Image (tube, rainbow, N blue to C red):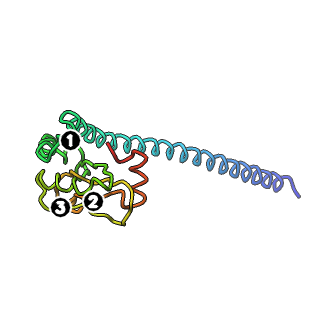
Amino acid sequence: MNKPRLAAFLTWVVGLLLSAGLCVWLHQANQQLMQSRHAQLTDEVAAAVTRKFGLYEYGLRGLRGAVVATGLEGFSWRQFEAYNQSRDLTREFPGARGFGLIRRLAPADEARFVIQARADGVPDFTVRQLEPHEGERFVIQYIHRTDSNRGALGLDVASEPKRRDCCLSGGCTG
């Protein structure tokens, strides 16, 4: 092989190796950049979700404060509606359909509770179950009255196994 061809061949090989090395380096740099950006976006989304849930927590804590101030046994639809009217749900808690209060009941107390709920301003109040069960009841006694919540009032959330587990772990009572 003559010298000019050998020089051209070596130049081609060196260029090919440099190009391949550059491609591998660029691929790794892009992968690291993508991973870093993905981690950053994941952190941003997690922070946004945490902030959003924090908003709802403020609403629930406000309702809990209203109940504590009155006492659970003295709390009524009138106080519940007053609390709801003091809030601008759409602006303060975007996406929330409202806040409610779940009452924990022994099965033996259900009939007395229904009589009290009817006397409190809901004449057709009944306790409804998704699936029959023998244990404690976790009944939605108060909930913001909107069309989207119509079926929730009186629902025993413990009648659905996953919700019952949540309630028994303290996740849905307040």
Amino acid type at circle 3 is Asp
**Residue 72: x and y, percent?**
22, 40
Picture quadrant of residue 125: bottom left
**What residue lies at 39% left-to-right and 46% top-to-bottom?**
171
Looking at the rendered image, the disc whose residue lies closer to the viewer, 3 or 2, is 2
Q: Which residue is mark 2?
A: 155
Which residue is more in the foreground, 9 or 33? 33
**Residue 56: x and y, percent?**
29, 43
Q: How far is disc 3 from disc 2 in space, using C-alphas?
A: 15 Å
Q: Which residue is mark 1?
A: 73
Neighbor class of circle 2 (other Cα within 10 Å; few <14, some 14-19, many 20+) is many
Secondary structure, mark 3, is helix
Which residue is more in the foreground, 90 or 29? 90
**Residue 46: x and y, percent?**
42, 44
Amino acid type at circle 2 is Leu
Q: Which residue is mark 3?
A: 147
Residues tagged 2 and 1 counted as in contact (Cβ below 8 A): no
Looking at the rendered image, the disc whose residue lies closer to the viewer, 2 or 1, is 1
Residue 48 is tagged as none
Amino acid type at circle 1 is Glu
Quadrant where the N terminus is found in the figure: bottom right
Secondary structure, mark 2, is strand
Looking at the image, residue 104 sits to the left or right of residue 33; the answer is left
Q: Is residue 129 above or below residue 76?
A: below
